[in-house]
Image (spheres, coloured by chain):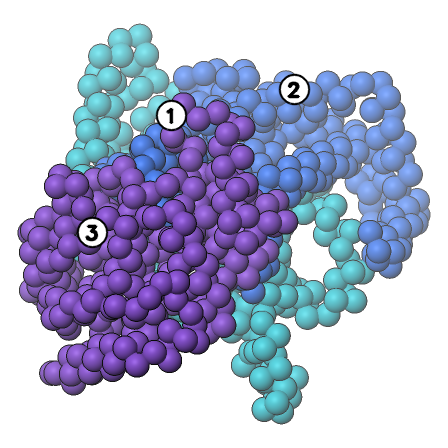
Chain colours: A purple, B blue, C cyan
Amino acid sequence: MLEVRELKKEFQPLSGKPVVAIGSVSFRVEAGQFVSIVGPSGCGKSSLLLCIAGLSRPTSGQVLLHERPVTGPPEGLILLFQEYNKSLMPWRSVLKNVCFGLENRPGMSRDHVEAEARRYVELVGLRGFESHHPWELSGGMQQRVAIARALVRHPEVLLMDEPFGSLDALTRIELEDTLLRLWESLRATILFVTHDIEEAVYLSDRVYVLSRRPSRVIEEIDVKLERPRNQLSTREDPRFIQARHHVFELISREMAKE
Amino acid sequence: MKHWSGFGVLLGIAVAWEIAGRFGFIHKLFFPPATKILTSFVTMVVSGEVLRHVGVSMWRAGLGYVLAAVIAIALGILMGYWRAAYESFEIVVELLRAVPPPAIIPVAIVFLGIGDQMKIFIILFSCAFPILVNTIDGVRGVDPVLIRTAQTFGLGQARLIWRVVIPAASPFIMTGLRIALAIALILVVISEMVGATSGIGYFILDAQRSFRIPQMYAGMLVLALLGYALNRGFLLADSWLMGWHRGAMERQR
Amino acid sequence: MRLPWKGLLVLGGCLVLWEILARQSGALAAYFPPASRVAATLIDIVKSGDLPPHIAASLRRFAEGYAIAAVLAVSVGLALGLWRGFYHLVEPLVELLRPMPSPATIPIAILFLGIGDEMKIAVTVYAGFWPILLNTIDGVRAIDPVLMNTAATFRLGPWQRFWKIVLPAASPQIVTGLRVSLAIALILVVTSEMVVSNDGLGFYILDRQRSFQISEMYAAIVALAMIGYALNRVFLAVDDWAMAWHKGLTRKEER
């Protein structure tokens, strides 16, 4: 349903030659899949997501959603950022932040919006915090608010840009499982960017490994592990270890290149 | 207030003032005792004389301030949000901003006479720049992540500005409004000193020129209290509207 | 540096519009000379030596008043910021005097100091004092305790702590205060010259208006605007040079 075709992105620095951030990237994501993208730092993962979300124009190539090219922010696609402290609105309460996800939907009454928002606040485990402000919450809870705000809109595709990158290890584990649980019950399609190899393997049906700049896809790995996944048994499964090993080798080889 | 020592100091100054005034230590005519100033303050307030002048000044300052706020915030959002607008108007704004506002008074007199219009225009002109500059800074400082988030939720331009850009820039806008409040008071006094027959600025200068010295001091006291009350009122509104911002800032530290 | 052509275009457009409107203004023509005539008048009055003494008088008052205000306010502000007890003593006094619009002190200053330079410099000092004072106090108070604790573990004495930590750490806020005061001091110089004087730009502008030499009035306002602009530019250049570390820091935090 989501397809990226030979996407290329260049940046023009203030002086000098243009920098090619993304060389040529192509891949597909099927409906309902959980797909991750991993790669060495500086491989243009974030620019790639901005292009897919229609917030930035690729230099060449295209992004297709349901076979139609993406030119602006498409309906049914939400991008979630790593910087929860910047993407939430500090002047709104938790509940009002989640309401924001539905506010520009025509034909929804205020009460309906609020009831839906309440439901999702509960789904992400924040019952009782509705009237708090984001800055009164811990980082993990703030990112839960951002997730609720995205999911309340029932997006077909959720793009996540290193959403757990700045959280501590335990919070991260908790949020990974919350995300999987919600994804399984809502059947959304998720494209997840991370630099954490284990996280990518643990969460995904498929992992795309990107090369260094100018980036391209060097391998696609199908992860054939049962769901629901489990932090202990899944991570101890030989197939998990093997997949992790393989991705790790690919990326180290990339990083070693000059 | 928890620190009574400060009020002790204030009281001490008043007593010293009283003694110096009574015995004429400083100047018999120019430095009347504190009680005399307070008496004329009370007389003026009771007779309603000073209230009339204060009312006139507040009307001028208020109208000029509100007009400046509306124009400057609108223009500031325009210039902060669209780079082309900023690049086009920046030089003109910088040049006009450099003019000390009292210098505009003679021009305003030429075009608008010495009535209320002139004073309102002067206040509008001088209040507009701090609000404008702070609004521009605030809008430009809105985090791109926030704007992109709103865009990914499919917000159109108008809603994006109304729901995201303005609230996010509002702490800066409030800073501009607070600076402009002080400037509005300064300029209403100046414009009433240069050309007027009413208003608190006129009252003070007129009292000095006709050697009604206690009245002059009492007029300054009125002005100080007025400034204090306005400032308090503003801070109250600010803490009510911007409570979220203070909380967020404290959290960051 | 790239030429800000859009801005210059708009500026040019404004000047052309002024020129055209003024030439068409008919009955208003006496009050509204075209831009070209104002420019010519400005050159005239500078060349003939009519304007320069007034500029010099205003600048001297400004410089003296601003310098005194800065020294006074920074020292008092540092003391008030460092010693809470001292601050509590004067707090109600500060709270009472600070919101009073500074031009209201002009009549008192006239009483005690007459109508000469002392009066004008005194009101300039008074007006310039408050923004610097309040910003200095805030700046000292906002110093991160971690920084002060670090200084303590390195066993810095009080004097060294003041010079090496307090003053530099509070300086960005102090500079903000100095910048606000710059504009206010200039306003008070011009105002005091308008209220009572026989020289200075404020006097010159009001006097030419009263004697209907409207072109001269506009020319002097333009000169004043250029002075205000130049002062601001000089200030920013000094600020850039002295506060480069702070700019680098805040830029990094923004990312």
Report the mark closest to the observer, 3 or 1: 3
Classify 10 Å Cα crowding around label 3: few (below 14), some (14-19), many (20 and above).
few
* Callouts 2 and 3 close, C-beta under 8 Å: no
* Chain of the residue that carries numbered disc 2 in the rendered image: B
Q: Mark 3 or 1 closer to N-term?
A: 3
In the image, is residue B253 above or below residue C191?
below
Say yes or no: labels 2 and 1 on the same chain. no
x, y (%) of residue A214?
10, 68
Q: Position of residue A167 (x, y in %)?
A: 45, 68
Residue A115: quadrant of the picture: top right
The secondary structure type at the circle numbered 3 is loop
**Percent x, y for residue C155?**
62, 91
Give how far apart the Cα atoms at labels 3 and 1 are: 28 Å
Question: According to the image, label 3 marks what residue?
Answer: A30
Q: Where is residue C152, by image quadrant?
A: bottom right
- For the residues labelled 2 and 3, the Cα–Cα distance comes to 71 Å
Query: Mark 1 = which residue?
Result: A106
Residue at 64% from the left image edge and 40% from the top image edge:
B240
Most foreground residue, C30 or A215: A215
Badge 2, how many Cα within 10 Å: few under 14, some, many 20+? Answer: some
Q: Is residue B250 visible?
A: yes
Instruction: Work out whether A29 lies above or below A41.
Output: above
Q: Output the chain of dot 1.
A: A
Q: Amino acid at mark 1?
A: Pro
- Amino acid at dot 3: Glu
Q: Which of labels 2 and 1 is toward the front?
A: 1
| Residue that sits furthest to the bottom in the current view | C155
Separation of residues labelled 2 and 1 (CA atoms): 49 Å
Q: Secondary structure at mark 1?
A: loop
Q: Which residue is mark 2?
A: B56
Question: Residue at coordinates 28% horizontally, 50% vertically from top-left?
Answer: A32
